[in-house]
Amino acid sequence: MNRRVRKFLVMNGPNLNMLGVREPGIYGVQTLDDINRDIERLATELGVAVDFYQSNSEGQLIDRLQAAIKDCDGVILNAGAYTHYSIALRDAIASVPLPVIEVHLSNIHARESFRSTSVIAPVVAGQIAGLGAIGYELALRALCVR
Amino acid sequence: MNRRVRKFLVMNGPNLNMLGVREPGIYGVQTLDDINRDIERLATELGVAVDFYQSNSEGQLIDRLQAAIKDCDGVILNAGAYTHYSIALRDAIASVPLPVIEVHLSNIHARESFRSTSVIAPVVAGQIAGLGAIGYELALRALCVR
Amino acid sequence: MNRRVRKFLVMNGPNLNMLGVREPGIYGVQTLDDINRDIERLATELGVAVDFYQSNSEGQLIDRLQAAIKDCDGVILNAGAYTHYSIALRDAIASVPLPVIEVHLSNIHARESFRSTSVIAPVVAGQIAGLGAIGYELALRALCVR
Amino acid sequence: MNRRVRKFLVMNGPNLNMLGVREPGIYGVQTLDDINRDIERLATELGVAVDFYQSNSEGQLIDRLQAAIKDCDGVILNAGAYTHYSIALRDAIASVPLPVIEVHLSNIHARESFRSTSVIAPVVAGQIAGLGAIGYELALRALCVR
Amino acid sequence: MNRRVRKFLVMNGPNLNMLGVREPGIYGVQTLDDINRDIERLATELGVAVDFYQSNSEGQLIDRLQAAIKDCDGVILNAGAYTHYSIALRDAIASVPLPVIEVHLSNIHARESFRSTSVIAPVVAGQIAGLGAIGYELALRALCVR
Amino acid sequence: MNRRVRKFLVMNGPNLNMLGVREPGIYGVQTLDDINRDIERLATELGVAVDFYQSNSEGQLIDRLQAAIKDCDGVILNAGAYTHYSIALRDAIASVPLPVIEVHLSNIHARESFRSTSVIAPVVAGQIAGLGAIGYELALRALCVR
Amino acid sequence: MNRRVRKFLVMNGPNLNMLGVREPGIYGVQTLDDINRDIERLATELGVAVDFYQSNSEGQLIDRLQAAIKDCDGVILNAGAYTHYSIALRDAIASVPLPVIEVHLSNIHARESFRSTSVIAPVVAGQIAGLGAIGYELALRALCVR
Amino acid sequence: MNRRVRKFLVMNGPNLNMLGVREPGIYGVQTLDDINRDIERLATELGVAVDFYQSNSEGQLIDRLQAAIKDCDGVILNAGAYTHYSIALRDAIASVPLPVIEVHLSNIHARESFRSTSVIAPVVAGQIAGLGAIGYELALRALCVR
Amino acid sequence: MNRRVRKFLVMNGPNLNMLGVREPGIYGVQTLDDINRDIERLATELGVAVDFYQSNSEGQLIDRLQAAIKDCDGVILNAGAYTHYSIALRDAIASVPLPVIEVHLSNIHARESFRSTSVIAPVVAGQIAGLGAIGYELALRALCVR
Amino acid sequence: MNRRVRKFLVMNGPNLNMLGVREPGIYGVQTLDDINRDIERLATELGVAVDFYQSNSEGQLIDRLQAAIKDCDGVILNAGAYTHYSIALRDAIASVPLPVIEVHLSNIHARESFRSTSVIAPVVAGQIAGLGAIGYELALRALCVR
Amino acid sequence: MNRRVRKFLVMNGPNLNMLGVREPGIYGVQTLDDINRDIERLATELGVAVDFYQSNSEGQLIDRLQAAIKDCDGVILNAGAYTHYSIALRDAIASVPLPVIEVHLSNIHARESFRSTSVIAPVVAGQIAGLGAIGYELALRALCVR
Amino acid sequence: MNRRVRKFLVMNGPNLNMLGVREPGIYGVQTLDDINRDIERLATELGVAVDFYQSNSEGQLIDRLQAAIKDCDGVILNAGAYTHYSIALRDAIASVPLPVIEVHLSNIHARESFRSTSVIAPVVAGQIAGLGAIGYELALRALCVR
């Protein structure tokens, strides 16, 4: 009997669809599609599948995360600004029996003080921040070795 | 002339669709459908109608609450995590001329400290917390005697 | 062998003996005796006994609560102002192996900000607030179904 | 070559669709349609176009704001309750290369203390508050002279 | 028909029975009896009656204050340490339809910082502090001219 | 040898010249001249002299207070809004070797929370608040018995 | 009978006499005289009179504001740094029965955090901030339509 | 001439009469009587007398402490929950010219954060916490060597 | 061509005219004139001119500081109590293109906690505190070597 | 087989080598050597061994504490100022499987407010404070009876 | 000419030498040597060199970090408890022109609240937390791709 | 008998050995050796001796400060980052009977907010900040005139 290939959800929150457009001094010139292509390439190399999702809506992110129970083995989540106040997203993470790794492109601790608070941090498996787009790839590696 | 049967909206917020799945140690093993069935049974007993709505989206919860002006006589609301920060939901409650009773399954004061703050509490008619699913039924009784 | 009828203690704290006198705009015109009569009526209907106690003294409330271990199956407690600072009462609640339900007549969250803090909330079984005298009756129902 | 007429987006957030209904003591008796008609009249006078959008959903407001990059020259935004906590909306404002003017009908500093905090204020071009529906018109004038 | 002589209650809280003994550097060498004698003398001069009460117990102070409704026209209250945290006493003051003047012997603002907070201050008619035993007499004069 | 008659300075700060005009619901209908006339009458009765000064300027109030060293035996000070933040005035009070009694017409503890803080309170001889214009007279009596 | 032309006071606080000199990166190169000339031009257009006043002194600003009761129909006030702590100015605004509109040239919310607090905001009719010198003109328009 | 044997008061506050019953995981299985017997045994060994008192009432604890002036040479005080807020008890301790040693059975710093604050700590001679019932004995030894 | 001698303004704020009179335990017995004479002597030695100014008025201090642009090369400022809250003075310092050195006679960090905050500190060139009158002389030396 | 004599480490942190020199008003005139001699004497009496260590270096204190695993049965620790902020020392205490008793010579709650916080308190077995050098001896007794 | 192999410093702070010993429930059973061996293996695979350093001393960690300027191309730093308060270490990181990646074995946001604050976070290149020993390896990969 | 030449210790804390290397935009291009040479030159001019010490270790700085009792007459201390949290260093300063002057090269109040707090400030003789390396020389002059 062959077990299916493991699949990981790469989920991006509000305004990350603007990457490459928005404040390139902070976020770099890569678009989200560029980043996802790199992640896909690494996934292939590691022999796992990846699924991508982006939404500006808190409710839709929760919906997708709940659905991941059925089709995913772990989640890489850049919750964008929702990181700082969405207790609803936090509860959703706590309610799904999947490892979730929190990723931030920029060093959230070197910006406005409110960005230092992550309400989801206490319920994720780990965080990777400040390392740019490579952070998603490290998160994927971390999920693969679990 | 016969007056129509009074109807109450039972509205549940984010992640409450995961009841019976999510952290049963805190929320019990009943699903939201189980709970709603019990509420429906009591409604019949009390001679009133009930309508059910659940959404993970803050905007949709507000939309439904605004619509309740036209077809409901009161609202039982478990706003889930939005309880703690959705001032938009609070404003919606304040804007509808209906009694709204806030319900929480668990004792929100015995958990993380941020769960002790309810931004909607100052504008609801009353709160019932910590009594499990029976809380919805007590809320229904309270609405019926108003 | 016949088990004795279950008995619940209805305990009211400081200034609740002034109900019907004090600030009727907030607390209504019913006296505490009026309220207790209604609770007694419901108790009879539910086949349980109730015992009433009121004191303005923190120490006496603790004494009575400790004594309830011997003769009661649960407590309905409106601790009045002690709600907001009596850690001694909180410890007493935690030390008695009985379910205690916290009741407030008014919506404590819609008044002065210090009334939003309940130091006893983390150790009670549940809270009912803002629903007026009916809150005691809902608490009694909740204790009966436990 | 003729340059196209400048267009401005007038965007209203949660519960502003209830204007004229909700708490008229605070917000007045004009409906949102009444206000928009007045804005349209002034726009015609000033030789510019205006587009209107209202939503109760944080995500949809962000979606619309991002889309404004393509078809608008500036934004007049009454974010309602999201003013006070939507960092996601704040990031969206920061990510669009358009002037955004924050408008509030009531004097947000003369109400509940949490309404004094605007998380979007640091990234908008300016604020106009407390002047009622005329505030939108002043904002339109301000955008026209930029 | 002759109206009865007006009577005022002079009520002292915890540890004020130790006056003249306790920390004379702060409170002076007069005993509480000495002070009361002076107050009585002034009352006679002003043609009013005074009644004295001291207790270390929060509950007893509340009991006495509630009873004052029946036999007094106003209250002079030095609540001692209860000034700083007894919300129960505050509620009692708010519930009696009598003017209550708060008196402190020492300047509570020139001592430990927690003594600057008076939880009863918002519900009393006025405060007199830092003027020593003369403060009681000034309070009596103030009650007489109301 | 005959000692000169004792003289006390009655000093009023910003906006107290508007008494009788400004917010009569809070401050009453008496003008500052009315009040001063009453104080003068009592001074005559007590055999002391009084001098009156009002200014909206922090610097002028300090100048006058410093000058009082030469011609006064004590000061009755209603510092108005400067009460809450003028550390300069506080330092001036501390630097003059005269008893200063702080007076407030209204109960500053029953209004906006920032009015509960008096930066001058720790350096005055005593405070009288909430008793209306009679407060000045009580302060005068207190100065006379020192 | 002909009614006199309406007159509005344009009042600027500390350091605004340095406009065009001080930190032009924040405040622009226009001097206060330049700005006042523009306001005067608009006043003429709108058929109203304007009076100008600038002072670095808190007391003088209060004096002028109190005097405005006699000769003005409204006030446009840029209180400069006094915005952030002058409760005396706040009380003066509350005491005059005239609409006062608070104007700030820069976006006070995008600068040092202490500039986000306006102690006068709760008592003014409205605020306009961040729109540069045009803010004064918008304020004038707002006063004219009241 | 023989000097009387020194006597020390061992005073326990609210809920300590429940020792051995209440939360044995935190407080152990010994009852208060067991503990007192051990203290008595040590007292005999050290040649001093001990007196025991327990009350749930703040006022009664203060009454007993004041009375100790006449018949005791020092006090061992476990004030239970009053430790955290009874400023009245603190004042009583400060007013008696006796050394008072504060004892806690459990490590109050390893429990809920509010238990870390002792309002009586600044006025006692010393504290012993976290060492169980042996703490009372160490306190007795400390009093004996003073 | 001969350049004019450099001139520095020595500016003292509220209550510093009371030096030698006020609280000598903190500020020493030298009067302000004594100190200024010593500064003048050092200025002569260093070949520079000094100008002296003292005022109790915040507005006058700002006026003088603004005027210094025309006739001074630097400022030595002991702002007294205005140090702790005068944002207006801070803005004035920021608006003048001159080095300003903040001086305090006493160690402001060893006194009341509110004296530890200097709102002008972020915009001055440097601070010298706690060294007594010699601090002014060190500041003069520092300005000379710039 | 004979079990080795139990040994306890008495560890003193920064500046405790200055005892008898530094602020004798607070810490007494005994030197650390005097104190250690007394502890040694008691150890002999109790039939246990003691080892002494003092260092001003946080790292060396941690090194010594870790080494104690191999040769000690418990630790008496006066961490001096590190008590208030050395989380590293706290982690070291938590990482060694030995009972550690925290000792302070003076009553840390009666001094500067920052001395009331002990970051090591939550992980030690117990605390003894304010009893002077006798505190070490009581700690030794407590370790011996464990 | 051949460039030397890149070398990275792996630096561990206080108590990390206790790994495998200390609280394995939180930190796992691997010793620091085990972890370092795994890092070395990966370094070899990636063609880079690694150097290891551990100290319990804040000063020695700073010394080593400063020395790294001469012989390293980047630093992987698990500062242990110093993460939360060592501003000295933070300054050292800011002073060396090398990328430093902050690593934590456990999820510091899911433990005591003080562990959520990292004073070094604002000056490091990035953070990796909660992923166990694999975090060091991910950090090494991140440094290699820079 | 000839008295020995007075000697002062110039002590620099963590990272100050990196001066001239680290963030020259903030600290200038002079190395610590350059600065010390200038101080030495001034010392010679003033006829006093100076001794220099720098360490990154908190413990070593305390050791050296304690040793200064024997061979120095005063201390010039730039404690670097330890300024902000080393209570151990503060206690060491308090324990040595020598005047200590705190020096900072940069204006610590114009940088990150945590740099505004100096825990050593309350116990030093004075502070000099923001004046660059000249600050050390001013401190030396101040010590010489004491």
Image: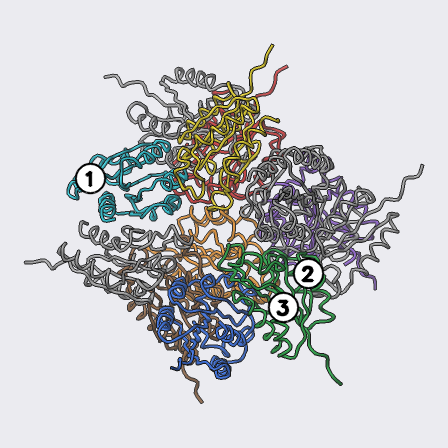
Chain colours: A cyan, B yellow, F purple, G red, H green, I orange, J blue, L brown
Chain letter, disc 2 residue: H
Image quarter of the N terminus of chain L: bottom left
- Numbered badge on residue B74: none
- Location of mark 3 (residue): H36
Instruction: Tell me where residue B44 appears, x and y as whole percent.
Output: 53, 23
At mark 2, the secondary structure is helix
Is H133 left or right of F79, judged from the image as shown?
Answer: left
At mark 3, the secondary structure is helix
At mark 1, the secondary structure is loop
**Disc 1 to disc 3, C-alpha distance:** 68 Å
Q: Of discs 2 and 3, which sits in the foreground?
A: 3
Q: Residues within 10 Å of mark 1 (few under 14, many from 20)?
A: few
- Location of mark 1 (residue): A5
Amino acid type of the residue tagged 3 in the rendering: Asn
* Front one among I145 and G122: G122
- Numbered badge on residue H61: 2
